[in-house]
Image (spheres, rainbow, N blue to C red):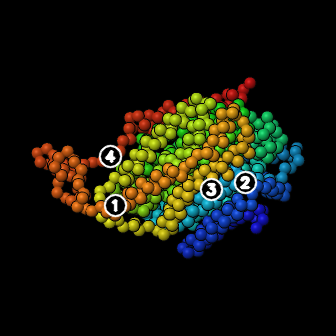
Amino acid sequence: MTQEWLIGALVLGPLALALLILVGPRGWWRDGLVVVAALATMAAGVELALKGSATLTLPPLVTEIATGIEPVVIITVLFLGFRVRSWLVMGMAVIQLALAAAGYLLERGHETVATVIRIDPLSTILVLIVSVIGSLIALYAIGYMRQHEHHAPTTAASTNRFFFFIIAFLGLMNGLVLVDHLKWLGIFWEGTTLCSFFLIGHDGTDEARTSARRALLINVFGGLMMGLGGYLALRLTGSESLSAAMASPAALIPLALLAVATMTKSAQMPFQSWLLGAMVAPTPVSALLHSSTMVKAGSYLILRIAPHLGQLAPVVAVAGAFTFAVTCALAIGQSNGKKVLAYSTIANLGLIASCAALNTPLAYAAALMLLIFHAVSKALLFLCVGTIEQTIGSRHIEDMGGILFKMPLTTSVAIVGMVSMMVPPFGMLIGKWMAIEAATQSPAVLILFIIGSALTVFFWAKWIGRITTASYHETYTIEKVSGWQIGVLLTMVVAVILGSLAAMPLYHYIAKPVSLQMVGQVGDATMRTLLESVDGLVTWPIFVVLGVVLLAIVISSLFFRCSQLRLPFLCGENVEGGAQSYEFRGIADGTETAMLNSYYLSPVFGEGKITAWSNPVAVMIIITLFGVIVP
């Protein structure tokens, strides 16, 4: 299959199948179309990656089509602003319409630039993340939504519409990362905003509608920054090509505007509230937004424009590092499992943006490693928490004590996902180690990286400790969960493990060459030496040690007998009740029950206390971004 046909399968294919899902019946027809869309998108994404780099020029008619689609998308945003009674959304949509009209008039004075599709290693990485991880999430959603329909509010939208937006999201994201044309980029950018609005508000509750409204407001602001940046780029550089326009010395203001757009889409501070609110949506939505689609659009764009940031780069690096450190601190104070995952996502997106803006080969390679491994591990964790929530009826960490017995398979998979976020030699930690090494020439960024990394260990270790705290049981029964859910969870946990085993080949054959292509040989000799030294990192002995430890645990459990069990001392004589008793004799021979609770340190890490000062600081950093432009 030619690359043109593959691009059609990746962009138009999901959109067409999404329409069939929307208008078709429920049941096997819908599920069958979702499976076809997921498998076809995965296959097309892998085949496109195997074909290598290329630049494809589409007919001028395609550019003319964009001229007609752009106002339709903006008018849709305007209508939604009216529907949710947001004057700010409507006002920003009107400004975008004016910018589109002004851009159209400005184009008349230039030769029409054909739409260009750029297939390079960076866009290929994103296509694989979207097509493979996103499609697996869609397959997981088949089983999840069957259960969700029984518990969702009666006002919830139809699941056909839900799957329409899930599948359409894949096509829009593939288009966003492949197109090298500012107008088409803006259309796909706003398309993802519309999909996220409907998916976040799917359940129709007051909380869901409020969260969807907030997501629309913040992302339309990002779309406005994108539209204004695109218009100024056309005006200042005369080009509608993203790569050509951003490489121009005259594009400093458009670059600053696009940098702000990336912050909104990837929920960097002070724009993080929309992604936190997205947690009310069904779990497949959370997984899709946080791992492979919505937020990765921001990461992709900052990676694409980072080599051209120039004097803006230090400010963008500090902004990302600040988000990383602060949101890691905020994660410590959360007892809601989904919120911990959300703050962790925001933190890692900040780390990726900061590494990209450091603009050295080692830092850029670190950003790519983090991008890849975060997508897989975080998607896995969101799906695990969603499965746990459906089973125990809660997403709070304190309610997860003992689930290792109730849900041994899902819990074990979740533990692997959490360990992969903080333990060597899994890919995430290798990426963070590279990031810290790359930040040694920027003291402020380095300190923030170290603080954030230390706090990361705290909240992941705390969560792992809570879910592994369980009384002894002689036998474990695998939980009854949809085959779709279990199948996807097992597939993704295997991907996490195999990906980490192959972390160094991924660095050598993907991250390092792409970073050298995008950034070039810049930085002093120390940075170049560090880039080369990563190739010498040997990780297999650590995996051997982990394997031996795991094997020892399995063997010891096989030879353990219940008669060897001794109850822990609980500040008094244990109450008769067998191996599972947590009761003891207290004052006046009364019965007391031992309680286990995690430390959340709310007086220090509470949301209200931290965001009260961190959001204003983040706003000041953004203002500084525009301040450095002034000569």
Q: Quadrant of residue 124?
A: bottom right
Please give left or right for residue 218 compared with residue 409 in the image: right
Give the x, y percent position of residue 361: 68, 40
Q: Which numbered disc flags the more N-terminal residue, 3 or 2? A: 3
Which mark is on residue 295?
none
Q: Which residue is mark 3?
A: 129
Please name the residue shown 59% across and 41% down the image: 434
Q: Nearer the viewer, mark 3 or mark 1?
A: 1
The CA span between labels 2 and 1 is: 51 Å
The CA span between labels 3 and 1 is: 38 Å
Q: Quadrant of residue 435?
A: top right
Q: Nearer the viewer, residue 453 or 589?
A: 453
- Report the amino acid beneath label 2: Leu
Q: Which residue is mark 2?
A: 178
Please name the residue shown 54% across and 36% down the image: 449
Q: Which numbered disc flags the more N-terminal residue, 3 or 1? A: 3
Q: Which residue is mark 4?
A: 597
Q: Is residue 21 visible?
A: no
Q: Which numbered disc flags the more N-terminal residue, 3 or 4? A: 3
Give the x, y percent position of residue 64: 82, 55
Q: Are marks 3 and 1 in contact (CB under 8 Å)?
A: no
- Report the amino acid beneath label 4: Asn
